[in-house]
Image: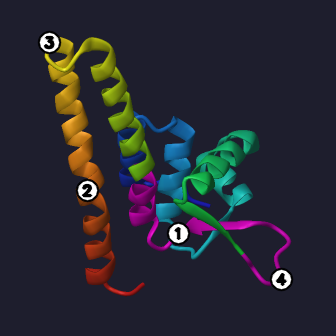
Amino acid sequence: MPALSDPAERLALSLAQGGMQRMTARVLAALLFTEQETLTAGEITELLTSSSGSVSMALKSLTSVGLVERVPAPGSRREHFRVRSDAWATLMSDQNQMVRVMREAAEEGIAATGENSTAGRRLAEMRDFYDYLWRELPALIDAWRTRRPAP
């Protein structure tokens, strides 16, 4: 099996710089760049020349956030994985919970510091930003789902 391509490695590096665990980013890049419909954990391990444990943990992480799914492979006894259709919209939908958490954290900070304090004004801007995202993200995701071509 050929190694991960330079563009795939660059994507993985960008994802890691954005906060994703390095191996998780590499596994996601492998699944995005493969020409196969699915890959097994063993194939990913071989492709990335990494340990099966680290690939397994990465797949568990990617599956739990909804980017990757297990798929049946008739005639195979191994689990197969692929990037979920609509993965990005699903991820952003789930991120709405993070938006809510950030907004609540800002509210707690405002309550502790007072809205008219310097910190309170900064926290109010944070709250207002997350309020805006909370209101706008669902409509953007719905618009994406209606306008995108069928898989």
Residue 119 drawn above or below residue 71: above
Residue designated by label 1: 84
Q: Is residue 64 magenta?
A: no
Of labels 2 and 1, earlier in sequence is 1
Alpha carbons under labels 1 and 4: distance apart? 22 Å
Of labels 1 and 3, earlier in sequence is 1
Alpha carbons under labels 2 and 3: distance apart? 26 Å
Label 4: element kind: loop
Percent coordinates x, y for residue 88 in the rendering: 40, 62
In this view, the residue in front, 131 or 70, is 131
Q: Which one is closest to the eye, mark 2 or mark 1?
A: 2
Q: Three-letter amino acid code at disc 4? A: Gly
Q: Which mark is residue 135?
A: 2
Percent coordinates x, y for residue 58 in the rendering: 62, 45
Q: Three-letter amino acid code at disc 3? A: Thr
Alpha carbons under labels 4 and 3: distance apart? 64 Å
Q: Three-letter amino acid code at disc 1? A: Arg
Residue designated by label 3: 118
In the image, 1: left or right of 132?
right
Which residues are drawn in magenta? 72-95
In this view, the residue in front, 105 or 29, is 105
Alpha carbons under labels 2 and 4: distance apart? 46 Å
Residue designated by label 4: 75
